[in-house]
Amino acid sequence: MEATTIVLFGATGDLAKRKIYPALYNLFVDGKLPEPFSVFGLGRREWSDAKLQENVEQSILTFSRRKPEDTDKLQAFLSAFRYSVLDVDREEDYKKLLDMVESREEELGIPQNRLFYLSVGPEYFKTIAYNIKSSGLGTTKGWKRLVIEKPFGHDLASARDLNEKLSAAFTEDEIFRIDHYLGKPVVQKMEMLQHANPVLQAFWTNRYIANVQITANETVGVEERAGYYDKSGAIRDMFQNHMLQLLMMLAIHLPSDSGPGDVRARKKEVVEALVPVQAGNIASQVVRGQYAEGSINGKPVAGYTSEPGIAADSRNDTFVAARLEIDNYFWRGVPIYIRTGKRLKEKSTRIVIEFKEPLKSAASKESGIAPNLLVFEMAPNESITLQLNTRDPGGSGEFKPMNVDLHTHRDNTAEAYENLIHDAFRGDATFFAHWDEVERSWQWVEPILNAFANNEVPLRLYEAGSYGPKESDELLAGDGFHWWFDD
Ligand code: BG6
């Protein structure tokens, strides 16, 4: 990997502390960082190099999956960090930064490969991209890349505007839009599993699949993010990005001779084939919920509108469930159910493919035979299992489900951010969201955003600690299904 300079906007922020520094450290220990690498941390606070290094060390001690054992190694890592005060609006600060970056590149004798990482609020994205270009920071003799965190826009129009502004400074190939769900190890295995197993691939169609269920339930509430979350809701915070990305990853079919660029091209086809929700029909396909007070793990918790910073009359969605269809050769007629919400009974992130009933005879129903399931679980545990039926080995003659384990989780494996940052260094954008996917996802959710804003979809209150509003169950019951694994 070629030597690289990371220019990190938001170096004093929470994401850098919790995710980015630990990920860089683990990559360093694994020998997966460019050699040499250098980091310029930027922020408004008057920090020194030493202060940044102290904070990076603290973040590793607190959040890294690996704790430093070798002090020399840790010091070598920390010594790559420099700090510079930067006001995102002030041109001179970028010029000063350019001088510093150039002299460091010279000092290390490395090419001008620059990875600009925007770990800041979305209100700063455009200004920073503009200034990177106008200051000359983006005019390099090596390569340049932009890694950008969510949210990518607030709706279709703002996403398009943002993309246009970024495109003035970076080409699409240079933009790496992070969706951390794409970095999750189980998600990264999805396409390979199908690709490498003709048996699974053969069954990955509407001929055999009864329905697909994608769940991302959380126990946490709004936490300290009232300002952001109350304007976003579950639909923008989770559904438009993470949930639709999971759907795309699951639904792609790759030809056997496919190359690295094909994953994204196929994902685009999937999202394009999503049947649009019809304006008058949204309330029958989409459930909008908000948590009321209740209890989680035996502990009483407040309702959403009593949370600090949330207005008592807020109608923001903290839960969304929807029924979708993909109108293409493979998926036509297969209902796809998606749900995500906060303050639910348990943290669980999973995709379940339910296969059609193997035997239709009354006898088979009586014997309690269960449908086959292929389950991708990302939380609370990581696993991929195929649930088959077998006869009880004890000899009772009853059918019992049997799980075939398709993914062995090893402790201490790379986390989402490590995978993604490593890919960004290598210039591999497979697991980053392409603009086409982002634009079409916004296009698909736009009628829902409007319907929520105009109160055309009833807001269902649900008790904290439940599985969400009962209308979410009814969405499946109407088709003769139920959410798997809710107890
Ligand atoms: C983030 C959302 O993108 O994803 C949060 O902004 C959410 O609201 C988080 O809690 C969930 O991520 P994970 O990896 O814990 O499922």
Image (cartoon, helix red, strand yellow):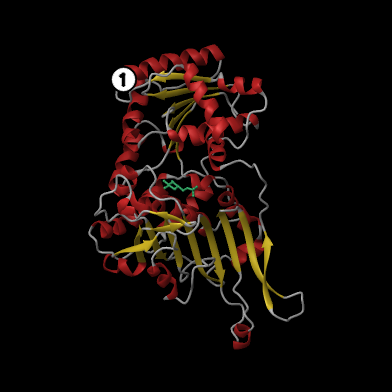
Return the residue found at the far bottom: 362
**Whether residue 474 is situated above or below residue 227 in the rendered picture:** below
Residue drawn at 50 percent across, 48 percent down: 181
| Lateral position of residue 100 relative to residue 366, left or right | left
| Lateral position of residue 462 relative to residue 485, left or right | left
| Lateral position of residue 20 relative to residue 155, left or right | right
The residue beneath circle 1 is 91
Q: What amino acid type is highlighted by mark number 1?
A: Glu
Residue 223 seen in the current view: yes
Residue drawn at 44 percent across, 75 percent down: 477
How many residues crowd around disc 1 within 10 Å: few (fewer than 14), some, or many (20 or more)? some
Q: Quadrant of residue 460?
A: bottom left
Q: Position of residue 285 (x, y in %)?
A: 36, 67
**Whether residue 463 is situated above or below residue 441 in the rendered picture:** below
The answer to whether the beta carbon of the residue marked 1 is less than 8 Å from any atom of ligand 1 is: no
- The answer to which of 31 and 161 lies nearer the viewer is 31
Q: Position of residue 48 (x, y in %)?
A: 45, 16
Quarter of the picture holding the N terminus: top right
- The answer to which of 353 and 191 lies nearer the viewer is 353
Residue 112 seen in the current view: no
SS at circle 1: helix
**Whether residue 154 is situated above or below residue 66 in the rendered picture:** below
- The answer to which of 428 and 72 lies nearer the viewer is 72
| Lateral position of residue 148 relative to residue 350, left or right | left
